[in-house]
């Protein structure tokens, strides 16, 4: 006796036969999900293509406003690392959520009221509380009593500074210099101006993290090791 269960007439009728498939009609949620874009697209000239382009533009605007911003190098003040016409990508989240600029960072900032009515790009040499001096007996910049070897990024043939200075950076501000010292207007040139040449941290737009154009020059920008051994201002005395 064959003990294998035999399908009933009801079983046969409930299964799709051959290659036939069944599909359930779209519910109210499915219909509303697709109805809204179609309805909005019908209001916009060009339909869905124009709507898609508009959404992309809004996304790029939000990205540029809050996350990343392209910046074109306007002068040779940061050569040789950054050349005129290079485009860098500025990380606008680098100093959010409690993070602050570090010595060696390349920052873009609003110079209005300090340098001029424009955005500038320079390297951070001193942060709040730092004692920055130029130059020591060997012609080097000192930060908190520690000489800094800038040969890895300083423009060939340039000295660390032809202008002597001895400053203490106020809290919440930055002392910034260009890498091409002989072709850079920076904190040294504004020591007698309002703010003493210091840049408020609040005016920093972000950190330059990538060169994105030209493609042959594209690279990630790293903080140099030159400042790694510089002690914090409060510990400078302990290190001599």
Image (spheres, helix red, strand yellow):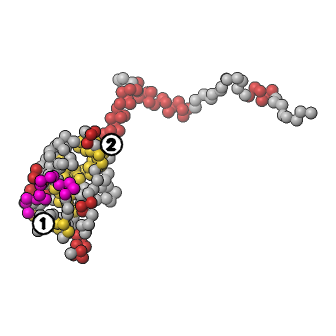
Quick one: SS at disc 1? Answer: loop
Residue 112 can be seen, yes or no: no
Asked if the stretch drawn in magenta spans residue 154, the answer is yes
Crowd band around label 1 with a 10 angstrom C-alpha radius: few (<14), some (14–19), many (20+): few
Query: Which residue is farthest right?
Result: 1
Q: Position of residue 157 (x, y in %)?
A: 12, 53
Which residue was labeled with disc 2? 63
Quadrant where the N terminus is found in the figure: top right
Q: Which residue is mark 1?
A: 138
Q: Indicate which disc, 2 or 1, sits on the residue closer to the N terminus.
A: 2
Look at the picture and state if 214 lies above or below 161: above
Looking at this view, name the residue that lies furthest to the bottom. 238
Q: Give the Cα distance between marks 2 and 1.
A: 46 Å
Looking at the rendered image, the quarter that the C terminus falls into is bottom left
* Residue in the foreground of this view, choosing between 112 and 29: 112
Residue 56 image point, x, y percent: 35, 34
Give the side of residue 32 with respect to residue 144, left or right.
right
Residue found 27% across the figure and 56% down from its top: 223
Q: Is residue 30 left or right of residue 141?
A: right
- Point 58% across, 29% down: residue: 26
Magenta highlight: main SS: loop
Quarter-of-image position of residue 52? top left
Q: Where 229 sits versus 49, above or below?
A: below
State if disc 1 and disc 2 touch (CB < 8 Å). no
Front residue (pair 185, 217): 217
Q: Position of residue 225 (x, y in %)?
A: 27, 60
The span picked out in magenta is 151-164
Q: Nearer the viewer, residue 90 or 135?
A: 135
Q: Is residue 36 left or right of residue 222?
A: right
Element carrying mark 2: helix
Q: Any magenta on residue 129?
A: no
Residue at 32% across, 42% down: 62
């Amino acid at each position: 006796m064959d003990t294998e269960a035999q399908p009933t007439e009801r079983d046969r009728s409930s299964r799709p036969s051959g290659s036939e498939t069944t599909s359930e009609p779209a519910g109210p949620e499915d219909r509303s999900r697709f109805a809204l874009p179609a309805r909005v697209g019908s209001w916009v000239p060009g339909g869905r293509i124009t709507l898609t382009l508009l959404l992309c533009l809004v996304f790029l605007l939000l990205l540029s406003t809050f996350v990343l911003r392209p910046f074109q190098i306007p002068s040779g003040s940061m050569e040789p690392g950054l050349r005129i016409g290079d485009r860098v990508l500025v990380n606008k989240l680098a100093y959010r959520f409690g993070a602050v600029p570090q010595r060696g960072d390349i920052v873009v900032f609003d110079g209005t009221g300090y340098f001029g009515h424009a955005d500038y790009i320079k390297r951070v040499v001193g942060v709040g509380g730092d004692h920055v001096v130029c130059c020591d007996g060997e012609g080097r910049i000192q930060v908190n009593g520690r000489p800094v070897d800038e040969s890895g990024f300083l423009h060939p043939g340039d000295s660390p500074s032809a202008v002597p200075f001895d400053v203490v950076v106020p809290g919440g501000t930055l002392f910034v210099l260009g890498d091409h010292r002989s072709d850079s207007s920076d904190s040294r040139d504004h020591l007698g101006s309002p703010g003493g040449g210091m840049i408020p941290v609040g005016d920093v737009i972000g950190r330059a993290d990538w060169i994105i154009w030209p493609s042959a020059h594209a690279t990630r920008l790293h903080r140099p090791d030159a400042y790694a051994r510089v002690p914090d201002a409060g510990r400078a005395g302990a290190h001599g």
